[in-house]
Amino acid sequence: MTQPTARIIEVAAADEGQRIDNYLLTQLKGVPKSRIYRILRTGEVRVNSGRIKPTYRIKAGDAIRIPPIRVSEEEAPARPGDWVLERVNASILYEDKGLLVVNKPAGLAVHGGSGLSYGLIEALRALRPEAPFLELGHRLDRDTSGCIVIAKKRSVLRAFHELLREGGSDKRYLALLKGRWRGGERRVEAPLLKNVTQSGERMVKVAPEGKPALTIFRPLTVFKDATLVEAELITGRTHQVRVHAAHIGHPIAGDDKYGDEAFNKRMAEVGLKRLFLHASALSFTLPESGQVVSVSAPLGDELRGVLDRLEAE
């Protein structure tokens, strides 16, 4: 067992700007997220001898007191199996000195927690044990496949987050929606409010008091009772494409949270076993270096097979 002792960490210049909760997640490997938020809420974590909120953004030179925390071996992140590591390694679409772009497989969470012993980021850390820094640039739902950015440097992570806040990235998704689409491009601008149910399930709904959200849908192929669309995210809210699609009466195929049960059953009959949502393309320019990154990820065989069967009908 790791012997618990209080310690003081001085924030390096390269780490400035992070939220304290995210910083502690990287510093306290193997400590459950719930435990980290508890020591923040109770004031056991101090910054420059004072209490802070989980949203506090750390500054270079901050002295962070971390209370004694016992970390058992059982709490340490599990190592993904070799088949997972091989699949993730084969899914790397782009890599340079500052970042990776991975075609995340459907069914693999972006990180461990909530009953999951590992996710994409743990797999990448196992693949690159020599890498001093690997962090998620953004997130995708567990059942969503496609392009996701992993930062290899703190400076790149900060730059990418700045791009996301300012709408400086171009994110495109492919989604199969219920029903025959009428007309062409449609802009859906509807504010989204995030809630957590009593059971702990995360739900999002359209609500006037929510955060602004804009999705542009463009029809690509119209089938008998479904339509393949490209969805461009102008903002990046939780479950945005899924909720906006349902809001306009065209829920995504295979969506067991916001979708249509009868439509999902019908799509299962043509071989769909997951949410039909794929982050197909991502492009951005890093502000300081001017580096242009543009990556695309083709649809996997399962989703392509569903479209082929719909086409045959």
Image (tube, rainbow, N blue to C red):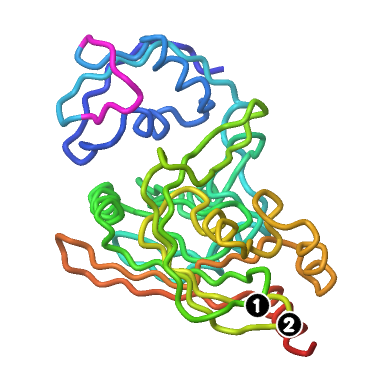
- Magenta stretch: dominant SS? loop
Which sits earlier in the primary sequence, circle 2 or circle 1?
Answer: 1
Q: Pointer 1: what residue?
A: 180
Is residue 165 shown above or below 57?
Answer: below
**Nearest to the observer: residue 223 or residue 85:** 223
Percent coordinates x, y for residue 61 in the rendering? 15, 26
Question: At x 55% / y 75%, what residue is drawn?
Answer: 229
Secondary structure under badge 1? loop
Is residue 150 shown above or below 65?
Answer: below
Contact, mark 2 vs mark 1 (Cβ under 8 Å): yes
Percent coordinates x, y for residue 159 in the rendering? 23, 53
**Nearest to the observer: residue 83 or residue 291:** 291
Disc 2 from disc 1: Cα separation: 7 Å
Q: Pointer 2: what residue?
A: 224
Question: At x 45% / y 60%, what residue is drawn?
Answer: 148
Q: In the displayed structure, does residue 130 sit left or right of residue 142?
A: left
Which quadrant holds residue 234? bottom left
Q: Residue furthest bottom?
A: 312
Q: Residues within 10 Å of mark 2 (few under 14, many from 20)?
A: few
Image quarter in which the C terminus is found? bottom right
Is residue 312 shown above or below 63?
Answer: below
Residue 172 seen anywhere in this rendered image of the structure: no
* Magenta segment boundaries in residue numbering: 49-58
Image quarter in which the N terminus is found? top right
Secondary structure under badge 2? loop
